[in-house]
Image (cartoon, coloured by chain):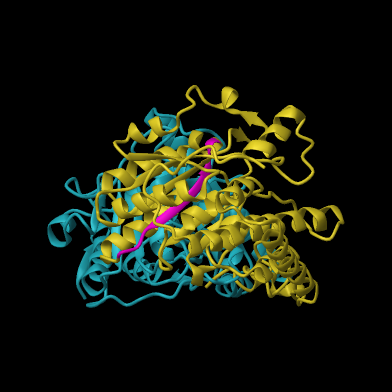
Chain colours: A cyan, B yellow
Amino acid sequence: MPELTYREAVRDALSSAMREDEDVFIMGEDIAEMGGSMGVTQGMLDEFGPERVRNTPISEMAIVGTGIGAAMQGMRPVVEIMYQDFLTLSMEQLVNQAAKHRTMSGGQLKVPLTIRTQGGAGWSPGAQHAQQLESWFVHVPGLKVVFPSTPEDVRGLLWTSIYDDNPVIFFEHRLLYPLKGEVPETIEPIELGKARVMREGKDVTVVAIGRMVPEALQAADDAEKEGISVEVIDPRTLLPLDEHAIVASVKKTTRCVTAHEAVTRGGFGAELAAVVQAGAFDYLDAPIERVGAKFAPLAFAPAMEQWVVPHAADVLEAVKRTVARA
Amino acid sequence: MAKVEHKPKGQSTLSDERLHELFREMLLIRRFEEKVEERFRAGELPGFLHVAIGQEAVASGVMAALEPDDVIASTHRAHGHTIAKGTHVNAIMAELYGKVEGCSGGYGGSMHLYDVEKGNLGANAVVGGGFPAIVGAALTFQFRKQPRIGVAFFGDGATNTGTFHESLNLAQLWKVPAVFVLEMNGWAESTPISQHSPITDFSQRAVAFGMKSIDADGQDVEAVHAAMTEAREHAVSGKGPVFLNVRTYRLVGHYIGDPQVYREKAEIEELRETKDPIELLRARLELSDEDFASLDTELTAIVEASVEFAKAGTDPRPEDALKYVYA
């Protein structure tokens, strides 16, 4: 099996779709000559030309909204919002337009639009370039939300997102871009709404997303040395959510920890905890633990930043707390 | 009877026969809107409604210059646009009654009238919300080399939104075949231009993007049609989008039941005397009282029938509320 970085895997999915399908095009800020602020679209301008690899002004509402209009005419646009912090600028188009046209039109319209974005802490970007806002969008009927953590998943899920007939917000994590991993020879589409068991275990289930997936795997390694067997599940898509896989795992392990880099309060872990208590209440041997960032706009100084966001050690501590209960 | 005050600016290509058709359509919109007001006050219509009384010539003049494949995005004041784009009044009235037979299947309501088959991509209840989708539709026509355009309707209040500026900038930058139709009625809900804009000539905002702008008298359907014909030709030929700066008058409140405490009663009365587009066209066509009465009777019956159609329509099943969340 070939090996790709997470960054290359994103590019491969985009380029493959564009080679096969002239309805697919990409647009966003600095994606053409510069190849994107994260280098994801490097080389694509040369291959596909400026009509299909479109640099845009700094106009997030128009980037998303133009994508909506093209999607409603049958194109499959993939728009890039450079940092997910800037999704805030396009919220009206995402929440009131993209998510609602299908219902408001009584099923006459569909919006096959993919909105790629990235972010995450760990390199001192300060408070406006590091947020993790995925949970905001899980609250909006009509949107789908995807957040892969491996090269194989990011490629297979991006392909599926492009060919989904609904608006999909596709989160990538900045620190995962250099991560290498094996991928299938050719793109294998991955169904939205299917979790992946990253590591099997029997004492505690950790449901982790984004950067916290590798952190949870590290925590599982560390826990094993102390005789605790940790199962790590990556839902990969938050909306739709593979509730069945998560509940089944917790029924087996009887303990659950959720982990994401976003702030804990109101984060996706709260939804996961609700799903688990509803589906596996009688099986639980400990309160569900939520791991996430502390409740503060992210400070710049590395010492403060690293203290605010969660790491493998925080997951390990939460795992130990659940085990200590029983 | 009011005199025709404004001659068409451009060369109108409308035959007398076509003008009579447009008169009929404008009067249909008027009678429809009056019926909507009446049924709303009778407590039959849920939600809240905005009628386009006074702005009929903009809808009819613009739509008469379009091809069937052209698409529009409308606003919260959408009934006239939707009728002029070809949706039957039965389907619109049924939508206002929340029926399955409505043009949005009962999912949209007055502010979300859709008819995709007729090129109506939907009315938008967020002021400024519809601009970028029209840029995207026009971009698709450009991609596919189709001789079609996208038309966004909006009022003067919308020219203060971020989407207006972002969308016009992008449309001109990419020279997409779009026309932005400003229905300048002088009011952002209850707020006059003097309180919402430092300038009164909104074409300056388009010109600032390098966009071609054409003025039209929105109470004169021939003038609107001539301007829109020129605008469409410019846009579809690849020269770029056009801003249509249409002066019109809202002869009613912002919404049905609006007491209009913010403007003088005498002003409204004067506008109704001098700026009613239907009276102006009636004078221009020199319609006899008999011909007018006969047409009026016919259209009133059509509108009355739409109410009967709507009331006899099917109530949606509550659980169908979830039917179209995802494709």
State the extent of the magenta-drawn residues as a range.
Answer: B147-156
Query: Which of the pair B300/A270 is nearer the observer?
Result: B300
Q: Name the residue rendered at 68%, 60% in the picture.
A: B109
Q: Quadrant of the N terminus of chain B?
A: top right
Q: Where is A204 relative to B315, above or below? A: above
Asked if residue A66 can be seen in this view, the reply is no
Residue farthest toward the right in the current orientation of the protein: B42
Q: Is residue A180 left or right of residue B286?
A: left
**Residue B165: where, in percent of width, then height?**
41, 37
Question: Which quarter of the picture shows residue B82?
Answer: bottom right
What is the number of callouts on the image? 0
Query: Which of the pair B60/A107 is nearer the observer?
Result: B60
Chief secondary structure of the magenta portion: strand
Question: Which quarter of the picture shows residue B115?
Answer: bottom right
**Residue B213: where, in percent of width, then height?**
36, 39
**Residue B181: where, in percent of width, then height?**
46, 46
**Residue A196: where, in percent of width, then height?**
45, 71
- Magenta segment: does it hold B148? yes
Q: Where is B197 relative to A147, above or below? A: above
Q: Name the residue rendered at 31%, 52% in the picture.
A: B235
Q: Is residue B5 left or right of residue A172?
A: right
Asked if residue B312 can be seen in this view, the reply is yes
Residue farthest toward the left in the current orientation of the protein: A46
- Magenta segment: does it hold B7? no
Q: Is residue A307 left or right of residue B194?
A: left
Query: Which of the pair A188/A278 is nearer the observer?
Result: A188
Q: Is residue B224 left or right of residue B271?
A: left
Q: Where is A133 relative to A6, above or below? A: above
